[in-house]
Image (cartoon, grey):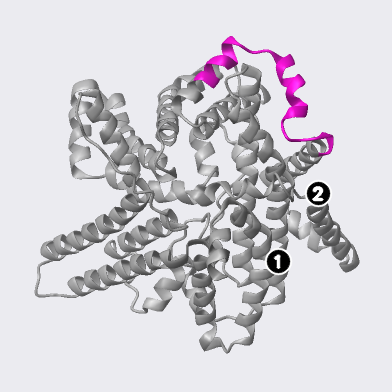
């Protein structure tokens, strides 16, 4: 019976099922057990919940986060011991600690690469071999990837790097470290957290408070609204459009737009559920989205979208590469030969390339993901080059960055660039994405789209539900962008009004959420990364 449960939960249906099963059944049971347990034992209740949650998706593969935690724990303690060895000179201590860090990071990445990228690398070698008339073969491994491996691997690397930099002390309590890496709300989709931000709170055994419980479930409800009412209603249409994408440019554009909406509502909605779950326990995780479509350019967009992933790459790839001695020497040579302006662009460009290559690979073993990373690398690098001339042009035209025409132009430009990037991201292959892009400009017939609206797995009420839901999200986003205190205003209402408001919100999610056949397979988009 338990085997059938594991098989169900690891399927697309199981992951979608978890969207409502998790906050309605699993989380309340965990909170109840946690609250009933004495303070000293509460962290063990959380740890048991973490491991049970992981088991329900990946079964025996629960060994992987335990092993990764063991690697991080051991390497951290060794670096601490070396740092305290005063018999060694400082330079020697730093060198030995760096070797330990490198060894642990390589081991963690090796586990990730073998489990997630082995077949991709093998098939790539086969294709290269065939191009040169070679005879290399690869037997597909078809390994089952542990859920959340990309997330807890990056968190382990961040922990070890912070210990090496002496930003934090090495943790002596293995249970505390394991509790952090496997914390069940963030296991499927993040956000990527830092050890010093939430580990103490997880292990403290603080009681559940009514205010935290209320605020947490309010956030969860908002996430369920975005996920079930908007994203999952769009899922059948997106699937159909991408399966029949080479018919007309209007369908290609519709596919890109609808997938962009679906992905944002799905990912940000799930993150709302995650953050809300943490809030019920008094754990406050980093925000992962901040109204990304109000960004002024691609760089700003990625400071607002998947914020914790961008912060990880900035702190652990961009700055270390930019400030490394080889890169600084390279920058000096470029500056001496081509001038200060070009020289100042050289180091950031190299670091940015590595960041976006890593971003593409992090999403998974597909060339479309790698292209997606390179796409943003080119966009952001181009923006860095033209930003100065663009601001000079605005002065000539007597405009500022906050002028309405400039804001409208930037919004339209960014939205188009984002949906094109998402189109390639979702396409089955790079060739399919390229063909869809070509047809937008060479074979665009709006009538084909209007005639196809009834064939996309959505009826009139589905379209109305999505439209009204989008309007609600847009209004809330505008208010948040203007720093309007939405929660404070709601809490200032009379108690009866607040109860009625949240009751109506629950009814909306229950009545208008996407359920049943045709929707269950939607799953959670970023759970597979």
Q: Which residues are magenta?
A: 435-461
- Quarter of the image holding residue 168? bottom left
Where is residue 392? Give x, y as percent.
Answer: 49, 19
The residue wearing badge 1 is 24
User: Can residue 493 be spotted in the picture?
Assistant: no
Where is residue 248? Give x, y as percent.
Answer: 63, 17
User: Can residue 385 be spotted in the picture?
Assistant: yes
x 56%, y 46%: residue: 525
- Quarter of the image holding residue 486? bottom right
Q: Secondary structure at mark 1?
A: helix
User: Within 10 angstroms of label 2, few (less than 14), some, or many (20 or more) residues?
Assistant: some
Among all residues in the image, which is located at the extreme top? 442
Q: Secondary structure at mark 2?
A: helix
Is residue 439 located in the magenta-colored stretch of the structure? yes
Where is residue 327? Give x, y as percent.
Answer: 22, 38
The label on residue 512 is 2
- Quarter of the image holding residue 146? bottom left
Left or right, 495 with respect to 12, comes to right
- C-alpha distance separating marks 2 and 1: 17 Å
In this picture, is 109 found above or below 427?
A: below
x 55%, y 70%: residue: 2
x 27%, y 33%: residue: 126
In this picture, is 211 found above or below 421?
A: below
Where is residue 58? Give x, y as percent.
Answer: 48, 62
Among all residues in the image, which is located at the extreme right? 496
Left or right, 352 with respect to 211, comes to left
């Amino acid at each position: 019976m338990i085997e059938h449960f594991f098989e169900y939960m690891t399927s697309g249906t199981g992951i979608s099922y978890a969207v409502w099963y998790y906050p309605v059944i699993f989380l309340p049971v965990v909170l109840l057990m946690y609250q009933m347990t004495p303070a000293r034992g509460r962290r063990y209740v959380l740890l048991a919940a973490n491991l049970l949650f992981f088991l329900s998706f990946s079964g025996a593969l629960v060994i992987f986060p335990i092993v990764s935690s063991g690697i991080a724990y051991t390497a951290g303690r060794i670096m601490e011991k070396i740092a305290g060895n005063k018999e060694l000179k400082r330079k020697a201590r730093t060198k030995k600690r760096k070797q330990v860090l490198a060894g642990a990071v390589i081991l963690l990445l090796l586990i990730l690469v073998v489990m997630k990228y082995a077949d991709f690398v093998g098939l790539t070698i086969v294709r290269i071999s065939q191009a040169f008339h070679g005879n290399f073969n690869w037997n597909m491994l078809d390994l089952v990837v542990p859920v959340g491996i990309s997330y807890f691997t990056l968190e382990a690397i961040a922990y070890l790097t912070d210990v090496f930099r002496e930003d934090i002390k090495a943790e002596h309590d293995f249970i505390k470290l394991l509790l952090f890496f496997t914390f069940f709300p963030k296991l499927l989709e993040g956000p990527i957290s830092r050890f010093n931000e939430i580990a103490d709170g997880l292990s403290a055994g603080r009681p559940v408070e009514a205010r935290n419980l209320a605020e947490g479930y309010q956030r969860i409800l908002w996430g369920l609204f975005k996920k079930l009412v908007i994203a999952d209603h769009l899922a059948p249409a997106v699937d159909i459009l991408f399966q029949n994408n080479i018919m007309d440019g209007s369908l290609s554009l519709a596919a890109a737009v609808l997938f962009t909406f679906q992905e944002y509502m799905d990912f940000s909605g799930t993150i709302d559920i995650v953050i809300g779950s943490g809030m019920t326990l008094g754990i406050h995780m980093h925000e992962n989205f901040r109204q990304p479509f109000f960004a002024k350019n691609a760089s700003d967009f990625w400071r607002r979208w998947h914020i914790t992933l961008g912060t990880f790459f900035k702190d652990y790839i961009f700055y270390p590469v930019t400030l490394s001695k080889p890169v600084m020497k390279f920058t000096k040579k470029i500056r001496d030969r081509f001038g200060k302006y070009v020289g100042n662009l050289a180091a950031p460009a190299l670091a940015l390339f590595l960041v976006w290559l890593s971003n593409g690979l992090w999403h998974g073993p597909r060339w479309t993901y790698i292209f997606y990373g390179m796409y943003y690398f080119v966009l952001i690098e181009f923006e860095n080059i033209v930003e100065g001339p663009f601001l000079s042009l605005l002065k000539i035209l007597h405009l500022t960055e906050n002028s309405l025409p400039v804001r409208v132009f930037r919004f339209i430009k960014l939205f188009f660039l984002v949906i094109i990037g998402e189109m390639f991201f979702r396409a089955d292959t790079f060739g399919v994405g390229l063909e869809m892009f070509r047809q937008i400009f060479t074979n665009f017939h709006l009538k084909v789209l209007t005639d196809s609206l009834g064939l996309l797995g959505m009826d009139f009420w589905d379209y109305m539900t999505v439209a009204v839901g989008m309007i609600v999200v847009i209004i809330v986003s505008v208010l948040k962008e203007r720093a309007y205190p939405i929660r404070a205003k709601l809490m200032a209402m009379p108690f009866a009004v607040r109860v009625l408001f949240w009751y109506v919100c629950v009814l909306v999610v229950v009545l208008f959420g996407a359920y049943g056949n045709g929707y269950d397979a939607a799953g959670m988009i970023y759970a597979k990364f």
